[in-house]
Image: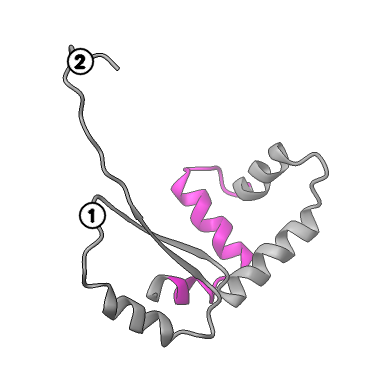
Amino acid sequence: MDYASALSRWGYGDFVAAVRQARSAPSGSDPVAEAAKERDEGFEAAHFVDTIARNLERGRLLLLIVGDGIQEGLEELTRTVSRSPQLGFTLALVELALFRRRRNESL
């Protein structure tokens, strides 16, 4: 929840700077817009930037908690979520079980 709250104080420039750092992109580039432009022929930069800035400000985020097992201690997490009504984030729990096949085992 602290993460969602911190992101809600970011502007578009802060978001781009974090992505740029994580991807080791050259300074001055906008890897977020570049990725969106590659996927959308009708890309409009101003609308894109405004939408991301607005969603950050409103805390409209998808927070995923992913683990190999969901523990029972989620009651406290639920209480924390209910204390943050000003943020419009969605919280999802994903249980992801991974199994290793033996080398000689066929599908």
Measured in 3D between alpha carbons, the distance from the residue under mark 2 to the one under mark 1, in whole angstroms, is 26 Å
- Disc 2 marks a residue whose amino acid type is Glu
- Disc 1 marks a residue whose amino acid type is Gly
To which residue does mark 2 refer? 105
Front residue of this view, candidates 32 and 78: 78
Can you give x and y, in whole percent of width and height, for residue 89 in the image?
A: 52, 71
**Quadrant of the rendered structure where residue 35 is?**
top right
Which residue is at 75% across, 41% downward? 40
**Quadrant of the rendered structure where residue 36 is?**
top right
Dot 2 and dot 1 residues touching (CB under 8 Å): no
In the picture, measured across the screen, residue 49 lies left or right of residue 71, that is right
Q: Which residues are magenta?
A: 4-29
**Quadrant of the rendered structure where residue 55 is?**
bottom right
Front residue of this view, candidates 34 and 79: 79
Can you give x and y, in whole percent of width and height, for residue 64 in the image?
A: 41, 59
**Magenta span has 19?**
yes
Toward the front, the furthest residue is 107
Q: Which mark is residue 69?
A: 1
